[in-house]
Image (cartoon, helix red, strand yellow):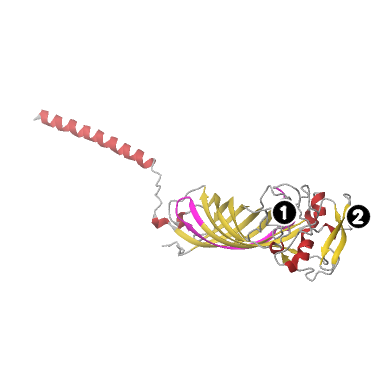
Amino acid sequence: MLGLILCLFLAQDSFGQFNRKVVKKNNRRLSTFTGKKRFSKEHVYSGLGFSLNALNYYGDLSPLPSKFSTDISFTKPALGISLFHRFGPRYTLIGQFLYGTLKGSDAESAKDPYRKERNLSFRNRIKELSLVAVFDLFENNGTYISRVKWTPYAFIGVTAFLQNPQAQAPKTYLDGSTDPYAGQWVSLQPLGTEGQYSNLKPTDVNYGIKPYSLLQVAIPFGAGARFRINEVLDLWADIGFRYTFTDYLDDVSKNYVDLNTLQAKDPKMTQLAQAMSYRSNEIKPAADFKNGSTPYNLNTPNGVVAIPLVDGYGAEFKSNNRGNKKYDDIYMVTSVKITYILGATFHKAKFR
């Protein structure tokens, strides 16, 4: 009997030791539990955004002959509206429409002597539709209520945009006759200022040039940060670039074309095309330029008129570059955006 009692006592003591080991093991597991959740369909949410943007242009009419040169004083506002869809712990897809203006002017911003005497200018009203993927640094595996207070992010996507380069017409045509479009903003693409609608020969510098499309594609990319305002509102701030595949945001890319060869899409607009292609004569008399000038016989509806062309501008030579065809144009978009989560409700705290 005594032996049986002793065996029961030892068994109980062994079970107690085993139970304590299990408790300690479970405590260790609990102390290392992070509480992470897996992102699921219940955590997906969408929203609406409104943005105020600033546009800056990088191209052939920038202050300096560098692809990193821009004129901050030509910063122009743009408005945007967007829809976003949060579909992962770090991933958001955004569709956005943006409307704004780009601007450049040799006379007002050029710091390079050649560009100053070239005297070209433009404005371009951009209407763009973008689809971008946003990648957050800090993840959120829960619902919109548990999203982080702030997170840096990067984005990349695709943009389609409509453009229309324009410039103000001069007071007179090159032959000195009155320009009926003086002071008006005229569209440059139909004028073919670099010979797009001209009958160019194989020996001409811009031979093979085609009219550029007003519908273009770009790659938007950039980075920023998003801040949580409350349960349903966020503030986004970012800087992005639109890498385009056109060198004609400013209607400037290649060489000057012989003025007598130059033709507009509408032949009635050819005199205006000539005046918009070569504008160095508007700065000062050709004889006052350091490079000097060369007499040129210009064919006009009223006959041949002798005009001076500033050397290096207007006339067709391989070295008479109107722009730099090696690099496509770029524009920068600096954005501040407010977004609202659709279908969300405020959760008020209850007090007892």
Magenta stretch encompasses residue 70: yes
Mark 2 nearby-residue class (10 Å; few <14, some 14–19, many ≥20): some
270 or 125, nearer to the observer: 270
Secondary structure at numbered mark 1: loop
The amino acid sitting under disc 1 is Lys
Write the start and end of the magenta stretch as one range.
68-93
Measured as percent of width and height from the top left, residue 338 is found at 57, 61
Q: Which residue is mark 1?
A: 201
Q: Does 54 sit above or below residue 152?
A: below
- Residue 14: which quarter of the image? top left
Measured as percent of width and height from the top left, residue 79 is found at 62, 63
Measured as percent of width and height from the top left, residue 299 is found at 82, 63
Which numbered marker is on residue 71?
A: none
289 or 14, nearer to the observer: 289
Q: CA distance from mark 1 to mark 2?
A: 31 Å
Q: Does 3 sit above or below residue 221?
A: above
Query: On the rendered image, what quadrant is the N terminus found in?
Result: top left
25 or 189, nearer to the observer: 189
Q: Residue furthest left?
A: 1
- Residue 315: which quarter of the image? bottom right
Measured as percent of width and height from the top left, residue 125 is found at 66, 63
Q: Which residue is mark 2?
A: 287
- Residue 169: which quarter of the image? bottom right
The amino acid sitting under disc 2 is Ala
Q: Residue at x 13, y 31 (%)?
A: 5
* Left or right: 96 as drawn, with respect to 266: left
